[in-house]
Amino acid sequence: MKRLILFIALFAVACTQPSYPGIDRPSGGGNTAEDQSIIDYIDQRLEAEYYWLDEVATKVNTFNRNVEWDNYLSQTLGRLESNADDGYINSKGQRVFYSYIREYQPSTRAQISGFGIELHYTIAVIDKDNNYYGFFVESVYPNSPAAEAGIKRGDVITMIGDSYITPDNYSYRFTSIQNNTAASLKLKLRRQTGDNESLDVELAKGTYAETPVVYNEIFNIEGYDKPIGYLVYTSFDAMYDEELLSVISDFAAQGVGEVILDLRCNGGGSVASAVKLSSALAPATFEERVLCQIARNPKNTKNDTVQEFKLSNTAEHLTNLERITVICSGYSASASELVVMGLRGLDFPVTLIGSTTEGKNCGMDVTRREIGDINLEYAPITFMCFNAKGFGDWGEGITPDIDLTAEDNELGIHDKNYPLPRADWGDEEHDLALVATLSKITGKKVSIATRATTTDDYTVATRIAPPVGGSLLYDEE
């Protein structure tokens, strides 16, 4: 059970920064000078800024610095007992931390080279007799090799080359597609909609642009008088704020009166982007209202303040929305949850449909630094999130108003393997989450395709941990 630990800032406590590595913390002899420099960097921020820095201070002299730098942080955090909100226990019973340090490539919105396929992180058994696995296509980037080959969200990859996907090879096979490590791909796929057809495609790498603003559409449902704007958004990435707000502006120009925000694949990201999106959706009367607060440990020697984030420019987009509906899942985390709970804290109605969210009520101050030849991005948990009412206790996840995994939900639309993708984005007959959401908004029974998708027939085999997301505040060093 996670515990939310609240620190009430009564006064700032000055701390003397020790030198590194210091007499009391010998460098050790089994790693490199570069390792030690990076470990120094890790320790400096843990002692000065980590939300649970009090325990760090009592144990820092016991940390094993005689390891490679990329093993040090998780090993060190695993020695602490008060930091239960930093991470979760995965399906294998292993502790996974939100805090991270990793290499990064300084980048812009330049095109990348690859196949253009995003895979779902849940892997299912599609042939029980032979124990063959299947990879589910979560999304396909426009104008990518995958899109040009006709691959769609919801397709199931059943073979790669001439090989089936098995317990022995699924890990590197998954990486070869998801991380574009293969030189080319020959795939056999099964489409879950229509006639459940089988497809054979061959892909070579090509260039395309990635974007978290994955899909948008306006639905006009017969007998319902408001156009419904539907937006799929997969990451709060500040580089794409302009593209995100452009979609909202188009919704306003088209007279949209309801908004479906699909965050089922959104693990979080920039706090600033979350505030901008909330501002674009909130009524104009909410201008300058506090969406959220973040609180750090009062002994944080870099920043011990409680920061407020206010809605702004609310009159520029959808000015008269009365509510929004959010499609969510266990992959919805951090900044996604912050939007939901922030707006609810202002008594703006937000209906959740899907399954219980991740439950990440904390965030990171992110720094970037070059040490030796390595560009590093470092993001320890440094703050807790609260809405305008001072509520921040969603560490166990936010329970949806309509749980699609429950057979007895009010709509009678049940998907036991949700959120395994069934169909392409915007498919209002086969995507049961979208079907349920349209039904809830309109009060009408929305048609489900006669041809049932095959997702219910699958058994979950394993899950691969998705990349770390979070509520992120950036500070370039």
Image (cartoon, helix red, strand yellow):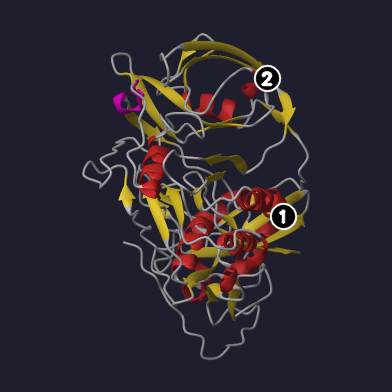
Vertical relation: 378 (above or below) 315: above
Instruction: State the residue at coordinates (47%, 31%).
Output: 427
Q: Is residue 227 above or below residue 52?
A: above
Numbered disc in front, either 1 or 2: 2
- Nearer the N terminus, badge 1 or badge 2? 1
Residue 375: assigned label? none
Residue 410: x and y in percent read 25, 47
Tally of numbered discs: 2
Q: Is residue 110 left or right of residue 5?
A: right
- Asked whether residue 194 appears in the rendered view, the answer is yes
Q: Amino acid at mark 2?
A: Ala
Residue 454 lies in the magenta-colored region: yes
In the rendered image of this protein, does residue 178 appear above or below residue 310?
A: above
- Residue type at mark 1 is Ala
Q: Quadrant of the N terminus?
A: bottom left
Q: Residue 365: in sight, yes or no?
A: no
- In the structure shown, which secondary structural element does the residue marked by tag 1 occupy? helix
Q: Residue furthest bottom?
A: 11
Identity of the residue drawn at 48% across and 34% down: 120
Mark 1: few, some, or many residues within 10 Å (few <14, many ≥20)? few
Mark 2 closeness class: few <14, some 14–19, many ≥20 residues within 10 Å: few
Q: Nearer the viewer, residue 250 or 142?
A: 250
Which residue range is magenta in the image? 451-457
Q: Quadrant of residue 439?
A: top left
**At which x and y percent is residue 324?**
47, 56
Residue 168 horizontal side relative to residue 19, left or right:
left
Q: Which residue is mark 2?
A: 183
Q: Are marks 1 and 2 in contact (CB under 8 Å)?
A: no
Does residue 401 appear left or right of residue 108 in this picture?
left
Where in the figure is residue 112, as x and y percent of width and height?
Answer: 73, 34
Q: Which residue is mark 1?
A: 33
Q: Nearer the viewer, residue 290 or 107?
A: 290
